[in-house]
Image: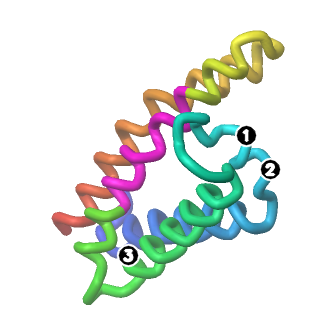
Amino acid sequence: MPSPTRSARLLSGLLLVAGVAHFAVPRPFDDIVPRSLPGEPRTWTRLSGVAELAVGAAIAYPRTRRAGALAAAGLFAAVFPANVKMAYDWRHRPAPLRAAAVARLPLQIPLVAWALRVARS
C-alpha cells in the first residue's frame, strides 16, 4: 500500500486526468448523463469535469486534502447513476464492452473507500 502522501497524489492525479478528459473528449461523458437530469448533457459533463478538477486540486494540497478527499468520496458516489446508465445502455454491445461497463459499478466502492482513507490520513 502506498504511503498516505503518495496515495493522495495518486488520487489527485486520477481526478485531474478525469477532469481534463471531460473537456478534451466530452462525448463519451455526454452519452452517460442520465436523461432524468434537466438541461443538456454537455452542461453536466462540464460541471462534473470542473468538480473533478477542483477536488483533484484540493487533494493535491495538504491544507485542503481532507476536505477534497471527502468531496471526492461524495463525487464518486454521485456519478454512480451515470455508471448504471452506461451499463444499461451497453447491454447489447460486444461482451468485452459490456463487461467493462458492468465492472465500473462495483469499482465505485473502492474509489469511495480510497477517498475516505486519504481524508483520514
Is 82 inside the magenta-drawn segment?
yes
Q: Label 3's element? A: helix
Residue at image mark 2: 27
- Could you tell me residue 22's position as x and y percent? 69, 61
Q: Circle 1 is placed at which residue position? A: 31
Q: Which mark is residue 59?
A: 3
Position of residue 35 measured from the top left corner of the image (x, y, whole percent): 60, 35
Question: As rendered, which of 11 and 5 lies closer to the eye?
Answer: 11
Q: Earlier in the sequence, mark 3 or mark 1?
A: 1
The amino acid at mark 1 is Asp
Magenta segment: 72-84
Residue placed most toward the observer, 93 or 39? 39
Is residue 23 rendered to the left or right of residue 67?
A: right
Q: Which mark is residue 11?
A: none
On-image quarter of the C terminus: bottom left
Residue at the extreme left of the image, as rendered: 120
Residue 109 x %, y %: 35, 37
Q: Nearer the viewer, residue 24 or 7?
A: 24
